[in-house]
Image (cartoon, helix red, strand yellow):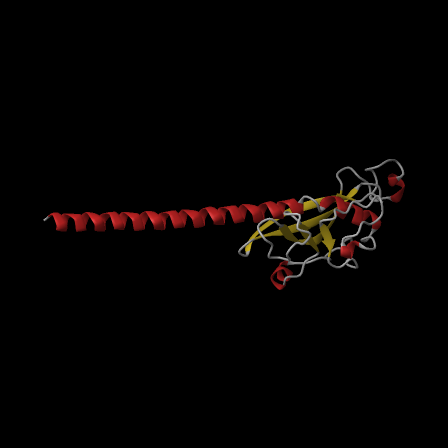
Amino acid sequence: MVLVTALILLAVLTLIAVVAMRTTTLDLRMTTNGMLNARAFEGSEGARVLVPDPLDDHIFYRGWPAGTAVGTPGPDDFDMPTELVIIDPSNNLYEEDEGLDMADYADGRRDMTYRADGDASGTVSDRSPTPEDISADLYITNLGSIQAPGSATSMVSGYEGFGKGAAAGGSYILFDLRSRGHAANRTEALTGTDVRIVVRN
């Protein structure tokens, strides 16, 4: 009877230990997945918030400065973060309907890339970074332009001050901006926003 009772207790304890181990493994996987999703989301957001300033300069200059394809700085007043790289500097986003649409996302086409060397190793893996690195792909589409409320379309109005005429801050160009952040184990997060750029010239 003692032997049978001991075997039953041992079987019960073994079953409890196996269930506890499987629960712990599942919790670990869930925690890891949540962490990777958070990293991908943060990478996506970190890249997205950097785009409006260089996009504003792009609209002002009607194009990207020379050298941005390899991440080198443009003119002194062209605000291009070193982590952002233009895929095709000849792509003029000032023109309506330029940029990418949803079909291009599946094809892997992109307008910009964001790569940050999180571990200071000197290299950043492309689209499949180590956990210490940060990366994202950016897609920008020109949605068209609209008149600012209270502005005039005539050129003479533009000389009366900023914000009055269409060529003096009286119109906006709207962009659809999508950012796809990457993390380890092929984890991705897609964030998006509408960006309104004032036409200043």
Q: Residue sitting at 84 percent across and 43 percent down? A: 77
- Vertical arrangement, residue 71 with respect to residue 104, above or below: above
Near-viewer residue (130 or 61): 130
Instruction: Say whether residue 199 is left or right of residue 183.
Output: right
Near-viewer residue (46 or 58): 46
Instruction: Say whether residue 108 is left or right of residue 145.
Output: left
Looking at the image, the residue that sits furthest to the front is 3
Residue 86 location (% of width, % of height): 74, 55
Residue 181 location (% of width, % of height): 60, 51
Q: Can see residue 95?
A: no
Near-viewer residue (129 or 59): 129
Instruction: Say whether residue 108 is left or right of residue 8.
Output: right
Q: Residue sitting at 48 percent across and 49 percent down? A: 33
- Vertical arrangement, residue 190 with respect to residue 106, above or below: above
Residue 155 location (% of width, % of height): 88, 44
Q: Can see residue 189?
A: yes
Q: Residue sitting at 25 percent across and 47 percent down? A: 13
Instruction: Say whether residue 132 is left or right of residue 89.
Output: left
